Image: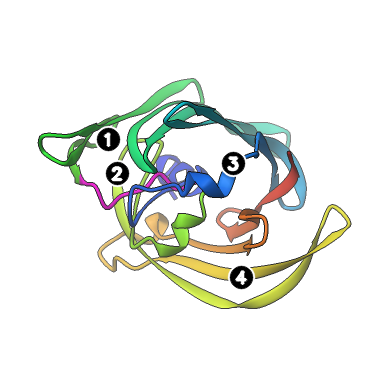
Amino acid sequence: MKMKHFVLIIIIFIYCSKATAHSSHYEGLKKIEMDVLRNNEVIGSTSYFFEFDEDLFVVKNYTNFKVELFGVKVFSILSETIEKYKDDKLIFFKSNTFQNDKEKYVNLKYHKAKNKFIIDGSSFKGEADIDCTIGNWWNHKIFKANKQISPLSGSIKKQTVNLIGIENIIINNKEYSSEHFKIKSNDESLDEDKQFEFDVWYNPKNNLILKVTYNKMGNWEYRLRSFE
């Protein structure tokens, strides 16, 4: 498997359905912290910080982890992103990621006259329909998505989302009722190493994604650590 394709799976995805965030669902929420685990070992973290500035809803994300095999660093990720919403509509997204010290980026802006997103990414440059949303592991709009844009490079891929069932899971010694979703790539033209399949557990009471798991060169998990 090519390393750049592997990293596309590891990085938190941006999903397309509608460029909304339902900011009212997150009023009063200041931050979400999640541990990143590989083979049940914590290797880093991803954290989201929420700000309400007059008519703007701003979400900042910081992700940092590294993978070691047999004591040797295979690769590392250091990433910062910022999303801005006005009237619950996405108007701006920016990311800078260092993958093994190599810089990747995405700059996305809403063009009002064209009613389009303009994307300048490290692997994609062009226009995108406004039925796209920045989806990462804080935004429950990902469950209505049928496409995704990589926050690493701006590339776009198709996906399907299915509700598996209602399950009770325990996170940090606390039991939550959750909706279990499966998110899969559905573009048969993609190479096998570009395909993805996520299991996601979501708590609708608190509008929180509790856990994300997938298997790609190991067993990976994003697990809620805390929120406030």
Could you say which disc has been placed on residue 27 in the image? 3
Tag 3's secondary structure? loop
The residue type indicated by label 4 comes to His
Question: Most extreme residue toward the right, as rendered?
Answer: 173
Q: Residues within 10 Å of mark 2 (few under 14, many from 20)?
A: some
Residue 46, image x, y percentages: 63, 36
| Mark closer to the observer (4, 2) | 4
- Residue placed at 42% from the left, 30% from the top? 55
> Where does label 4 land, which residue?
180
| Mark closer to the observer (4, 1) | 4
The residue type indicated by label 2 comes to Ser
Spatial separation of the CA atoms under disc 4 and disc 2: 26 Å
Q: Which residues are magenta?
A: 129-136
Spatial separation of the CA atoms under disc 2 and disc 3: 31 Å
- Residue placed at 76% from the left, 72% from the top? 168
Image quadrant for the C terminus? top right
Q: Are marks 1 and 3 in contact (CB under 8 Å)?
A: no
Q: Is residue 178 above or below residue 15?
A: below
Residue 167, image x, y percentages: 71, 75
Q: Are marks 1 and 2 in contact (CB under 8 Å)?
A: yes
Q: Answer whether residue 128 is visible to the viewer in this image.
A: yes
Q: Is residue 133 magenta?
A: yes
Question: Most extreme residue toward the left, as rendered?
Answer: 113
Could you say which disc has been placed on residue 155 in the image? 2
Q: Residues within 10 Å of mark 3 (few under 14, many from 20)?
A: few
> In the rendered structure, which disc, 2 or 3, sits on the residue that comes first in sequence?
3
> In the rendered structure, which disc, 1 or 2, sits on the residue that comes first in sequence?
1
Q: Answer whether residue 67 is visible to the viewer in this image.
A: no
Tag 2's secondary structure? loop
The residue type indicated by label 1 comes to Ser
Q: Nearer the viewer, residue 184 or 94?
A: 94
Residue 174, image x, y percentages: 85, 58
